[in-house]
C-alpha cells in the first residue's frame, strides 16, 4: 500500500456529482462524501465573503437564503458571457464547478486518510461530460478541473463510462448497447458495441438543454397555476415561496417514481393549500419532453444504421431515468426492458474510475515510448502490481467525433464557406490531410466545429494568423493536416508544399473561454478559500 497512488474518476453532474477510484485490490469504489453519501449535491452556498459551503450542507440554505445559492451550473458550461454574482464578486461556470470538484477532492483525501492512515493527495483525474458536449463545454470542464488543482488526464464521454462500468466483466460477450443517459440537466443517447476487449462508439446525439430539471420546472409551473387559479397569487413571484415550492416539487417528482399519487403543499402570501397530482397527470404535463427523448433515440439509431432489434441491452444512466414514464417509453419504442444491472446514479463515476486507470497506464506507456516493447511492458506490469491492478482486464476504447470539424475557405468570388475535414461520427483518433492554396499576404486559418456551410452557422474554435508562411507571388500552396485524438483534442499542422521543411504545428486544445492567466488567477483566489 505504501506506493499506491489513487487515480480518480469524477462524474460532474448537473444535480449530483460523484467520485470513484480503482482500489489496491483492482476493484472500483465509489468514495462517500464527508456526509457519508455516495453522491454529492452539485450545489454551492456562499455564506459570506469567506465561507463556501458545497454539497449536502448547502441544501439547507436553498430555501433560507436562495439569493446566495448556485446550482445547475453544468448547463452554463462553455458560455463565455455567463456569470453569477455573490457578495459583489462575479463567478464563471468554471469557477463554480471547480468548487464542486474541490469538495469531491477534499472528501476523497479525508477518506484516504481514514482508510490508509496517511495523507494522500488526489491529483490525477478523469472527468466525464455528455457525449454531445462541444469543444467549449469540454474546455470549460477541463478548466474547472485545473482550478480545483487536479491534473485532468482526460475528458471522457458519459455513455462510454456507463458502458465500461457495465461491460468490464462481460468483455467476452459481444453486445450492442444503447445508453440512455438522462441526467439532471443534459440528455445523451449513444450506441456502443462491445466486441472482445473493445468498446466502440457507433453513434451519439444529445441535447444539452434537456434533463430532469425540465420535468421539475413543468411540475412547478403546474402547481403554481393551480394556486393562482384559487388565490390569484403566484408563489413564483416571491423568492422564498418559489424556492420552497421548487424543493417540494423536486421531492414530489422523486416520490412519483415510487407511488402513483402525491400531494404538494403550497404556502404563499398568507394563503395555503395542498394539491394532489398523479403519475399519469405528471406524464401528460411533460409528454413533449418525452417526445424529444424519443426523437433523439430514433436519430441515434439512424446514424448507426441500426434498428431496435439490433440492440442487445438498454443501459440507463442519470437520475432522471428512475421516472417510470421514461422506462415505459423506452420499453414501448424498443420492445425491450431496460437493464437494471447498473446504478444510474453511480455508473458514470464507476466507469470514469476505470477509464482513469486505463488512461494513467496509457500515459505511463507514452513516457516509456523510447524503451523497447519488452521493457515497456515490464515497467507497466510493475505499475499494475504497485497499484493492485494486475487483475484489471485490458480494454480498448474507441470513440467517435460528435461534431464535425472543418476549415473556413473562400470561393472564387471571395465568399467564405465551411469545408468539413472530419465529419460527424468519424472514429477517433483520426487524421486527414487536404491541400489548399492560400492567397498572398498574411492569411488567417479558422478552425470550425459544428454543422453548417457558412462561418456564422458554426463555432470558430481556433483562429490563427499564418505569418510564418512564405510570401509567394500568387499565394502559398499548403497541406493542412487535422489530427484528432481520443481525448478530443485537435492538432492542426501546416506544411508548405514547395518547401516541406516549413511546418507550423497548432494545438487547438479544449478552449473553455478563459485565458491561461485568468485560470491561474481564479485558482489562486480559490486556494485562499476553504470549502465546507
Image (spheres, helix red, strand yellow):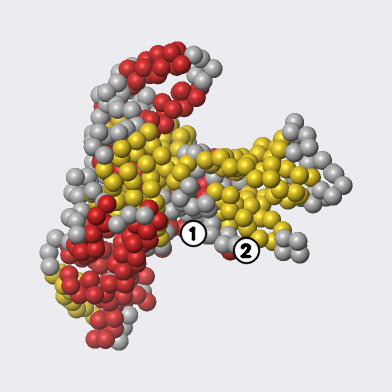
Image location of residue 239, percent across then percent down: 37, 70
- In front of the other: 449 or 99: 449
Q: Are marks 2 and 1 in contact (CB under 8 Å)?
A: no
Image location of residue 359, percent across then percent down: 42, 31
Q: Can you see residue 484?
A: yes
Kindly identify which numbered label has been placed on residue 84. 1
Q: Is residue 286 left or right of residue 453?
A: left
The image quarter containing residue 212 is bottom left
The image quarter containing residue 206 is bottom left
| Rendered position, 277 above or below 62 | below
Image point 34% across, 46% down: which residue? 192
Q: Secondary structure at mark 2?
A: loop
**First in residue order: circle 2 vs circle 1:** 1
**Within-10-Å neighbours for mark 2: few <14, some 14–19, many 20+:** some
Image point 26% across, 51% down: which residue? 311
**Within-10-Å neighbours for mark 1: few <14, some 14–19, many 20+:** some
Image point 58% across, 49% down: which residue? 421
Q: Nearer the viewer, mark 2 or mark 1?
A: 2
Instruction: Point out the image quarter for the N terminus.
Output: top left
The residue at which mark 2 appears reads as: 454
Image location of residue 59, percent across then percent down: 30, 55
Amino acid at each position: 500500500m505504501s506506493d499506491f497512488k489513487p487515480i480518480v474518476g469524477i462524474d460532474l453532474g448537473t444535480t449530483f456529482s460523484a467520485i470513484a477510484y480503482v482500489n489496491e485490490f483492482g476493484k472500483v469504489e465509489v468514495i462517500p462524501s464527508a456526509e457519508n453519501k455516495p453522491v454529492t449535491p452539485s450545489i454551492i452556498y456562499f455564506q459570506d465573503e469567506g465561507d463556501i459551503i458545497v454539497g449536502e450542507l448547502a441544501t439547507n440554505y436553498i430555501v433560507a437564503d436562495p439569493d446566495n445559492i448556485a446550482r445547475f451550473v453544468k448547463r452554463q458550461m462553455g458560455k463565455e458571457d455567463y456569470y453569477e454574482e455573490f457578495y459583489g464578486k462575479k463567478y464563471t461556470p468554471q469557477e463554480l464547478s471547480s468548487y464542486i470538484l474541490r469538495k469531491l477532492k477534499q472528501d476523497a483525501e479525508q477518506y484516504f486518510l481514514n482508510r490508509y492512515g496517511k495523507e494522500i493527495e488526489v491529483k490525477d483525474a478523469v472527468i466525464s461530460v455528455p457525449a454531445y458536449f462541444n469543444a467549449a463545454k469540454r474546455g470549460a470542464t477541463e478548466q474547472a478541473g485545473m482550478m480545483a488543482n487536479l491534473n485532468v488526464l482526460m475528458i471522457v464521454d458519459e455513455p462510454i463510462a456507463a458502458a465500461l462500468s457495465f461491460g468490464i466483466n462481460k468483455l467476452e460477450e459481444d453486445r450492442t448497447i444503447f445508453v440512455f443517459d438522462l441526467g439532471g440537466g443534459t440528455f445523451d443517447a449513444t450506441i456502443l458495441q462491445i466486441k472482445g476487449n473493445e468498446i466502440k462508439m457507433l453513434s451519439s446525439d444529445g441535447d444539452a438543454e434537456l434533463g430532469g430539471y425540465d420535468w421539475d420546472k413543468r411540475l412547478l409551473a403546474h402547481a403554481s397555476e393551480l394556486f393562482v387559479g384559487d388565490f390569484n397569487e403566484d408563489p413564483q413571484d416571491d423568492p422564498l415561496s418559489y424556492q420552497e415550492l421548487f424543493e417540494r416539487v423536486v421531492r414530489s417528482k422523486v416520490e412519483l417514481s415510487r407511488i402513483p399519487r402525491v400531494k404538494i403543499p403550497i404556502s404563499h402570501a398568507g394563503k395555503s393549500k395542498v394539491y394532489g397530482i398523479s403519475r399519469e397527470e405528471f406524464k401528460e404535463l411533460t409528454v413533449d419532453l418525452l417526445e424529444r427523448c424519443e426523437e433523439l433515440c430514433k436519430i441515434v439509431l439512424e446514424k448507426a444504421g441500426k434498428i431496435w432489434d439490433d440492440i442487445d441491452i438498454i443501459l440507463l444512466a442519470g437520475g432522471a431515468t428512475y421516472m417510470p414514464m421514461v422506462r415505459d417509453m423506452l420499453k414501448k419504442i424498443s420492445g425491450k426492458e431496460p437493464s437494471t444491472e447498473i446504478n444510474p446514479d453511480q455508473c458514470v463515476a464507476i466507469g470514469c474510475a476505470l477509464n482513469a486507470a486505463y488512461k494513467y497506464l496509457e500515459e505511463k506507456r507514452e513516457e516509456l515510448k523510447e524503451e523497447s516493447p519488452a521493457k515497456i511492458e515490464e515497467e507497466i506490469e510493475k505499475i499494475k502490481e504497485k497499484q493492485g491492478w494486475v487483475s484489471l482486464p485490458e480494454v480498448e476504447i474507441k470513440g467517435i467525433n460528435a461534431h464535425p470539424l472543418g476549415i473556413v475557405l473562400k470561393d472564387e468570388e471571395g465568399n467564405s464557406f465551411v469545408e468539413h475535414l472530419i465529419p460527424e461520427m468519424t472514429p477517433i483518433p483520426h487524421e486527414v490531410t487536404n491541400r489548399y492554396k492560400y492567397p498572398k499576404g498574411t492569411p488567417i486559418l479558422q478552425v470550425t466545429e459544428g454543422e453548417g456551410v457558412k462561418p456564422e452557422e458554426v463555432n470558430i474554435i481556433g483562429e490563427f494568423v499564418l505569418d510564418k508562411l512564405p510570401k509567394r507571388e500568387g499565394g502559398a500552396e499548403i497541406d493542412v493536416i487535422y489530427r484528432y485524438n481520443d481525448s478530443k483534442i485537435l492538432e492542426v499542422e501546416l506544411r508548405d508544399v514547395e518547401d516541406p521543411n516549413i511546418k507550423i504545428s497548432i494545438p487547438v486544445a479544449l478552449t473553455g473561454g478563459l485565458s491561461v492567466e485568468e485560470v491561474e488567477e481564479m485558482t489562486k483566489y480559490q486556494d485562499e478559500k476553504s470549502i465546507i
